[in-house]
Image: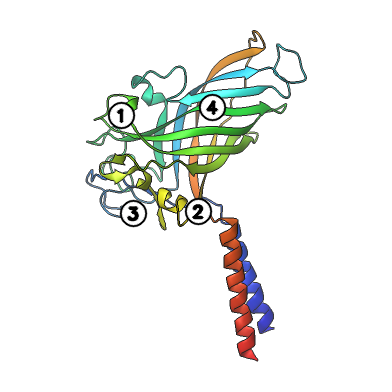
Amino acid sequence: MKKLISTLIALSIAGSFAGSASADEFYIDIGSNQGGNANTANGPNTTGWLDQLSFLYESTSVITDGGVGGANALSVGDTILSAGGVNNGNFVDPTGISNNLIDGFEPSETTFGGPSNNGFGPASPLQWGLTFGFPDLAGTWNGSGFDYTSGTISMYYYDNTMTNLAGFVRLFDLQVSSGGDTGNSTVLNGQLVNFNALSSVNGVDAADVFNFALGSFGELSGPPNNQIVSFNASQDTQAIGALQFAGGQAEFAASHNGSINFSQVPEPASIAILGLGLLGFAGAKRRKAK
């Protein structure tokens, strides 16, 4: 019985790592101590531990007829190409930032100086914030919602010392690989890529601004770790009103809000090596028992 229990424990531990795609806590290092931030994750320059970010943004989209229905109606197979955040057609740099940004942390703080935020938002002396944009979120209408298959969402740091979008620091890209409408929200899935190692935020490498307990997002995603850092963005679903098609295309604009969280996803090869190692350990215990 002990042999069987030992093997089952090894298998269950390997399985728990294989399924570890749930959201992980993270913190943000802005390289500046804004004061009054007693509950930091890793020193006075960081926020406290965060579960997720909330966001809002505006988008402009073009739907192209390619489906089985008429050319002047939304039908299965029609495609969508959306731009949003600082890349949407209505964004006026930088006056449109208040409608296209990360607008809060969870857990949240209501006043400057409280734990977790390290001065995030307009009450901070530095007045720093996070924003994002995407020029190419693509999907296909399935009859009740859009199935998304690609798109690049870039995350930026900014503060009141920066006067235009060109001065914002790009931290990383969120590479969308799948997603769609769930009935009450649109969920996008993917992984983080293109960490910016050439720029810094108050002396902190851009790739090291976002961090898990085991290291920065950039460190974990690069060699030798090569670990997938995944994101899940959930946003409100809006009904699409009457579309005006012209030449097989229709354009429309919308406003959105939602939340985003992150997780560490071990590579399949790492999971297999871990599983073999644990099983080998279990086998060694059996031999020793004899």
* Horizontal side of residue 76 vs 171, given as left or right: right
* Residue type at numbered disc 3: Ala
Labelled pair 1, 4 in contact (Cβ < 8 Å): no
Which comes sooner in the sequence, label 3 or label 4? 3
Mark 1 sits on what residue? 167
User: Which label belongs to residue 115?
Assistant: none
Which comes sooner in the sequence, label 3 or label 1? 3
* Residue at the extreme top of the image, as rendered: 246
At which x and y percent is residue 39?
Answer: 30, 53
**SS of the residue under disc 2:** loop
Closer to viewer: mark 3 or mark 2: 2
* Residue type at numbered disc 1: Gly
Whole-Å distance between the Cαs marked 1 and 4?
22 Å
Which comes sooner in the sequence, label 3 or label 2? 3
* Residue type at numbered disc 2: Gln
Q: Nearer the viewer, residue 262 or 280?
A: 280
Mark 3 Cα shell of 10 Å, populated few (<14), some (14-19), many (≥20): many
**SS of the residue under disc 4:** strand
Whole-Å distance between the Cαs marked 3 and 2?
22 Å
Mark 2 sits on what residue? 227
Mark 3 sits on what residue? 41
Mark 4 Cα shell of 10 Å, populated few (<14), some (14-19), many (≥20): some
Q: Residue at coordinates 69% horizontally, 22% vertically from top-left?
A: 78
Residue 133 is drawn in which quadrant?
A: top left
Which comes sooner in the sequence, label 1 or label 2? 1
**SS of the residue under disc 1:** helix
Closer to viewer: mark 3 or mark 1: 1
**SS of the residue under disc 3:** loop
